Image (cartoon, rainbow, N blue to C red):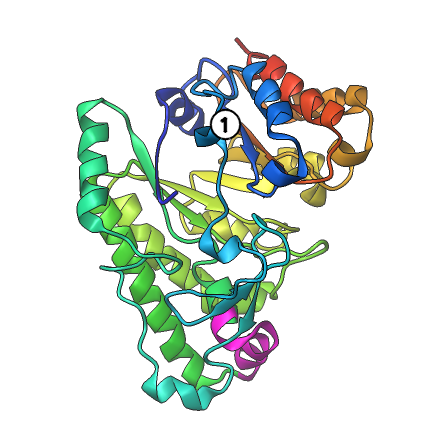
Amino acid sequence: MPMETITQNTLRAIRFERPDHIPMVFWINPACWHHYRPEVLFELMADHPRLFPDFVPGPAAITEPAPWERAGLPYADAWGCVWQTTDDGITGTVTRHPLADWAALASFVPPDPARTNAMTGIDWAVERHRAEQAARAGLPWSASLEHGHTFQRLGYLRGYENLLLDMADGDVRLNGLIGMVEAFNLGLVERYLDLGAVMMCYPEDLGMQKGPMLSPALFRKYIRPVYERLMAPARDANCLVHMHSDGDIRELVEDMLASGVDALNLQDLVNGVDWIAARLKGRVCIDLDIDRQQITPFASPRRIDALIRSEVEALGSPEGGLMMIYGLYPGVPVENVRAVMDAMERYAGFYA
């Protein structure tokens, strides 16, 4: 969702203003609804009201896949990038890069931020109405660029290998394409700030299993300046800045923080909890992405509880600066799903 209401407790956690509890988010990927029996997930959600305070069982609680998450149905986004997936609910990959050949750039027309957020259409009159409703209810809200807004978008357009070669070669045509992508994203940021967003989110995957997807030098040359310009309007408006990246981003973190980040969502075990504690605790709000690769799918419920408790102990503080999120994907045993939920609810109040 490009707009989401957020709680005052979350704002206090980000601002190190002694939140009532550690904000915990348990996100269920849409594919889970056909890999698990819905009634099983409903029972788990009903048993964990702290994680799902607004849960009402029934069809409305089931998250439907986005158009680009439909198996066997290629989807062209607003940039002309074609997405395909093999499992309903799982975001697939771009299989057609409209600018794989630089010759196509001369006639290429970028999308209009007045009409789309890049992946689907956007009606700004509807967004304004939602913002006004939230304001009347006294509910702060956040807004987000598309996931993969800059570096990944360039890769979607050119292809990953082409993009890295462009950067390594210093291809002057790349600068024009970067400017095109930046202008589109800036149009979205400015519109959301005009509507009163209290936090802007900039989600983008930059890390691999080991190391970043591009070198720190190339990141500093091509991507960091764009981040700084996209985040500057939010900073000027006293709007919080939230950054997300999956993967090992240790070599890029300092440059990311220099762009003006208030909350950083990163993965725990890929980057190392001890490293995160030593380098980030107290400097930025850590929005910790709980392991989905090693412990939660394969270990015992007791080990899962120990993992989450140890992360709270290492990274948390009564002053705030810690949030946690878990993304459930197919393949995790139900008893382990329950263990994650139990631990998140249990340790949310660790400093209360």
In the rendering, at what x and y percent does residue 176 appear? 36, 79
Q: Report which quarter residue 261 is drawn in.
A: top left
Residue appearing at x 61%, y 76% in the figure: 161
Q: Is residue 113 left or right of residue 39?
A: left
Query: Bounds of the magenta span?
Result: 156-169
- Quarter placement of the N terminus: top left
On the question of residue 279 being in view, the answer is no
Vertical placement of residue 331 versus 225, above or below: above
The residue labelled by disc 1 is: 321
Q: Which secondary structure is most common in the magenta stretch?
A: helix
The three-letter amino acid code for the residue at tag 1 is Gly
Outermost residue toward the bottom in this view: 103
Vertical placement of residue 219 versus 247, above or below: below
Residue appearing at x 69%, y 37% in the figure: 291
In the rendering, at what x and y percent does residue 297 appear? 76, 35
In the rendering, at what x and y percent does residue 18 appear? 44, 16
Outermost residue toward the top in this view: 352
Q: Is residue 167 magenta?
A: yes
Assign a secondary structure to mark 1. loop
